[in-house]
Amino acid sequence: MSRCGFLGKLRSLSKLRHYGNRQQRQQLESFEPRKLLTAPPQFNQQPQSLHRPQPSFGAIVTAAKALISILLVAMYVASSIGSAQEAEFASDLEDPKNIDIKSLTELRVKLVGEGGEPVVGAAVMPYAMRMKEDTGHGYWNREKLGPPRDYFSDETGVATIRYPAKVFSLPNPLTTSLVTFQIRHADYVREVVHFDLGPDLENVPEETTVDLKKGCELQLSAVDADDQPVEEFGVVMAGPFQPDMWAKDGEGGLRTSSLNDGTWQTMLVKPQTDGPTLFSGLLPLRVRPTQALHIRNVKLSPGARIEGRLDEAVPRPIRGGYAMITSVPKAEGDSWQEHSPSLVWHDWTSVDENGNFVLESVPRSGEIQVIVTCDGWVSKTTVPEARSFVMGQLFTVNEPSTQLTVEMEPTGTLELTILRPDGEALQDGNVSTWPNQKYYKGGSTLLGSRFRSIDAVINQMKPAAERTGLWSDGRSELPYLDCPVKNGLVVLRGIPLNRSESLALMHDDFRLQGGLDEYPRFTLESDEPKSMTLTAVPHEHKKPQEIMQEAGQALQAAEKAIRNLLGK
């Protein structure tokens, strides 16, 4: 290739806004142009007179070596892209934020029963990943990928699932190193698989085999308060093996053979559009592999009505108020434990401007946890094991109707000023912090996130092909999440006091100073707005177009220096 042709290719590639496959990206990201493209000091010297001195032979050799080095580096970058792929590379101009969709990868999951038989009709749902470059588990972007969906095994027992090999994150996309999926079938124990993709993420496995365990058999039927049969109901069970693939038993009830052996708190639930939700009492079912368990005519009745009120510390009218409850009919271990887990029931409702809220029907016995958020206030935490979490207050529920008052305390506001390295105000981007609430006998989530267990029951009652993934409500309304930066100022509200929190900036070019794996921290001591100033620094990794531009600029500078030395 001629030098002019090479330069033309290099310059055209430097104008691209996005880059191609994973191998190309890794080659570009590992390339360090500044170490190789620095011109020798004499290239920057200016002539001291109008009479240009004749270069020495050594200077010409030095300059020629530099030019050759630059050409070799630039040719390496260009050749790593490959002329055969240049058309595809040049046409790949989509926003890199869509990499979650563009990198979708297939994995064949072969399901085998205890006798080696293929398991047909199982639902396999991928729903979370772990990343090579970051800790944590999740990363499924619902806005881009939609809610997690089921893929069903065919007559050979194979379900072909899809997951993103890359997810968008700043400063660079993250690479999936582990994918999590659950497997459900009416005759086999529910499995959650954390599939490690291995050390070579450029050549990930295309197939895996999962052995399924035959479950214990359970049949249930229900009646209402008048002893009339209830044919449409759902089943809630404690623990990680909760089955949600139930079949009709032909006698007006439900059956499953997917129970893991053990003792599991169980509750039958009947959703109603024209009345309160019906619940059974708590059934501590003991199931064994050798014994089919049949329980007939379980009575369902309306749950307890909860009438709540915020204490008088909160000025009226109340704005943006929500009450989140977790009902625990019989508290034992945490809800996800494999041994003696507690059954939990989640619900939420809005708080009116007078500070009142009503939940029409929750399980009648046991304790309920109440967490309330509204503009400028949050429920006081009195649960002893809360640590740094917001956990609200516990109340006993044993009567058809319960009245309660929720103690409240103020939240704080952070007024954050963000400056660029040159001292100018940052003009765009979004800033988040992430205070957490913790469910009683359960896990944690962002403060103010909301979920209704009744949605899971309704989903369970649908045909398997019509089910959807379930997600918390209200995250788009959280006053401390994805807050926009305008003229260098961003305001985060609703932050609990006297807790150490972290900050993160989402921006194409900048991050908040504190290291790639560290986030600036802050604590609000009072409800008076707190001012804080931080500096945004550039992301440490260069974009590929910047690498190509630097290579082209360095090549032009070297060419000019050679011409100066040669007197041309």
Image (spheres, rainbow, N blue to C red):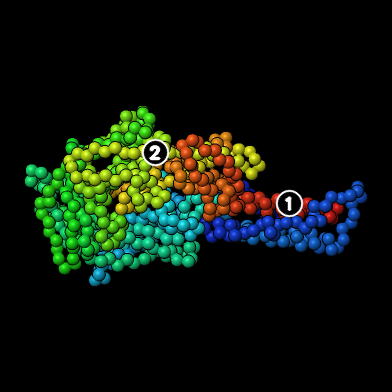
Image position, residue 324 (x, y; %): 32, 42
N-term mark: 2 or 1: 2
**Placement of the N terminus among the 4 image quadrants:** bottom right
Q: Position of residue 123 (x, y in %)?
A: 29, 57
In the rendered view, does 41 fall on the left or right side of 199?
A: right
Mark 2: give few (<14), some (14-19) or many (20+) Cα within 10 Å: some
Amino acid type at circle 2 is: Glu
Viewer-side label of 2, 1? 2
Q: Mark 2 to mark 1: distance in Å?
A: 64 Å
Residue 244: quarter of image: bottom left
Q: Nearer the viewer, residue 128 or 560?
A: 128
Q: Is residue 427 left or right of residue 226?
A: right
Other-residue count near label 1 (Cα within 10 Å), few / some / many at <14 / 14–19 / ≥20? some
Of all residues, the one furthest to the left in this rendering is 227
Residue at 69 percent across and 61 percent down: it is 72
Residue underneath mark 2: 409
Q: What residue do we see at 49% from left, 55% from top?
A: 174
- Would you say residue 456 is visible in this rendering? yes
Residue type for callout 1: Gln
Residue shown at 29% from the left, 35% from the top: 309
Whether 395 is drawn above or below 151: the answer is above
Residue beneath disc 1: 556
At horizontal 39% and vertical 38% (from top left) the residue drawn is 409
Instruction: Identify which residue, 116 or 373, lies in the foreground.
Output: 373
